Amino acid sequence: MDSKLIFLDIDGTLTEAGSNIPPESALVAVRKARQNGHKVFLCTGRNPGMLSPLLKYGFDGAVACGGGYIFTENEVLYDCPMTEEQKKLGMEILKRNGVFRTIEAKDQTYGDEDLADFLAEASEGNSELIRWRKALAEELNIHSMSEYDGRPIYKIVFMCRTQDQLTEAREALEDEFNFVVQDVAAHNCLNGELVNRKFDKGRGVRIVSEYFKVPIEDTIGFGDSMNDLEMIQTVGVSVCMDNGSPRLKEISKMVCPSVTEDGLFKAFEELGLI
């Protein structure tokens, strides 16, 4: 079997949302796949600071920040933070419209001070919301916005009650940024990400593929939510977790059991990776 490049989303795919501890079966799958000559990359919206606890389990690198920062074990392949003008405009408009903001630098994350209260009322049905709530509750590298020191920012995560709160931001920023809104479960809560149109997870897959000279048809991607869309559309074999978005399942070539039912291990077996 030719060597494959495997790309794993984290929250809801490699781990339960908000967790840094994968099921043992997933770790066995990753380890055996690498022993068989395949390379395994994290492919995540998390920045390197938030994904770093997982690197001890053995990965060949990561497509981080939704594709804005890409690294192997030894080299940075891509680095594209927002410009100062983009950051300032986005932050000001969102704040003016009562949108809760979390900003991600390479190694630190900062959230509006009242974001925790907002999340406490939010739905349990969205993996991204659960991740952010747990991250705040456990102080998983999320600092108060008042501590932000001006370092480069790769992404703005937003949460609000209505689409109207995003209208002004869309008018000002949508030419340069993609508003990735997650599936909304309940409780009148919208959450999503403001992602630079210069990059996405799919382009990240291509950058890694070109670096290792592996054809796209020999890439495999695992995801669970709509922020995995471009990855799922790009890889040779796309896999959605059973706990994932119904929309993502529809366009994926394969659906595997959920993260809590040894889904990665079973899919790796079915695909002949281990």
Image: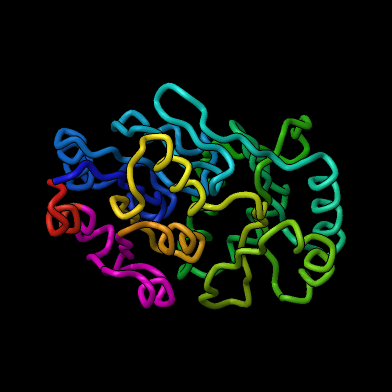
Which residue is located at x 14 percent, y 37 percent?
36
Q: Which x, y percent locates residue 59?
A: 32, 34
Residue in view at x 55 percent, y 52 percent: 200
- Residue 244's image quarter? bottom left
Considering only vertical position in the picture, is 26 above or below 183?
above
Q: Position of residue 98 (x, y in %)?
A: 80, 63
In this image, 243 relative to 18: left or right? Answer: left
Part of the protein shown in magenta:
237-264
Is residue 261 covered in magenta? Answer: yes
Q: Say left or right for 131 vs 31.
A: right
Q: Residue at x 34, y 55 (%)?
A: 221
Q: How is the image coloured?
A: rainbow
254 lies above or below 19 = below
Vertical placement of residue 72 versus 235, above or below? above
Image side of residue 120 versus residue 88, left or right: left
Tell which of 151 and 131 is nearer to you.
Answer: 151
Residue 15 drawn in magenta:
no
Residue positioned 79% across, 60% down in the render: 173
Residue in front for this viewpoint, 164 or 139: 164
Question: How many marks overall?
Answer: 0
* Residue 248 found in image quarter: bottom left
